[in-house]
Image (tube, grey):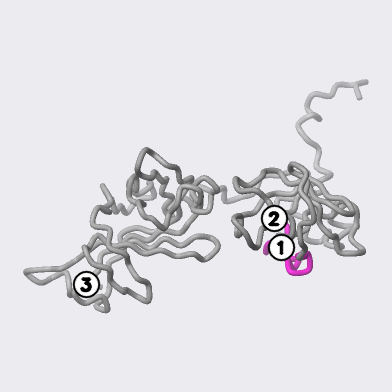
Amino acid sequence: MTDVWLEGPVTSAAYGWRLERDDGVTLGFTSHDLDILHDGLLLRASPGMKPTTIVESLGLENDGLDVSGALTSDAIRADDLVAGRWDSAYLEIFLFEWSNPDAGRRLLANGTLGAVSLSGDGVEAEFLGLKQALERSVAPQTSPSCRARFCDAACGLNRLRFRHFAKIGGVDGSTLGVTMPPGLPANSFAYGSARFLEGANSGLSSDILSSDASSIRIASLPDQPILPGTRIKLTEGCDKQISTCASRFGNAINFRGEPYLPGNDLLTRYPGGS
């Protein structure tokens, strides 16, 4: 389909950028010198923002795109970058008619950001195009533990059944005191996650290493202090063993592993060995 607004003798095209974090925070920028409302999103004027190179190809090789220095904005703060809030953010780069924003747009590149880091006064971000998905293995490898993610489509369990809300009662290093829901098996939150719902760490998550009747121990502490009374969302976890899947969740039919398949150590055995 041809973009009519690009065919005239004089065009007024500008670059547009759309950045959307996993938690829903969305920012828009444009290379034009005025703010422009485009497709329901206010694109902030950032005349210095231009991609250095965009290469479209018909093959399966990765498209070339350098987004180094392109994310300079007061809305993208250093502490958010360090905390990883912008990691895996969705990115679109497009051309549009700034004098008539409703005329349409030409999508140039879209994908996700890899690790985002500070570099002097600017920002560097790895761009992962949609072709990255083609690099994944087509057939799964065998494994004694389950390859499914807890409560994903392959697992089949409903994640809402295993979410709980609590308040942090006290903090001792990486151990957080919380009021546990009654009736849960011991260490139910091991391999699960904790998400902060308010305060300076709102939106950040951490893996849970272990839990007991009154506390959880998280894998990594956020940069900002954790305050008692902070609301937190806890998601139970699974150790991906067939015994756990069968006895605790009653979900052995969906177990995505081969717990009884002989491993490579079988090849090293010899007659009379054990």
**Looking at the rendered structure, which numbered label has been put on residue 2?**
3
Region in magenta = 149-164
**In the picture provided, is 180 more to the left or to the right than 101?**
right
In the picture, the quarter occupied by the C terminus is top right
At label 1, which amino acid type do we have? Arg
Q: Which label lies toward us, 1 or 2?
A: 1
Q: Secondary structure at mark 2?
A: loop
Q: Magenta stretch mostly in which secondary structure?
A: loop
SS assignment at label 1? strand
Q: Residue at x 36, y 55 (%)?
A: 73
Image check: 243 left or right of 1?
Answer: right
- The answer to whether residue 145 is seen in the rendering is no
Can residue 195 be seen here? The reply is yes
Callout 1 environment at 10 Å: few (<14), some (14 to 19), or many (20+)?
A: some
Query: The disc labelled 3 sits on which kind of residue?
Result: Thr
Q: What amino acid does circle 2 point to?
A: Arg
Label ID, residue 149: 2
Confirm whether the magenta stretch covers residue 156. Answer: yes
Spatial CA span between label 3 and label 2: 42 Å
Residue that label 1 marks: 231
Q: In terms of image quadrants, where is residue 268?
A: top right
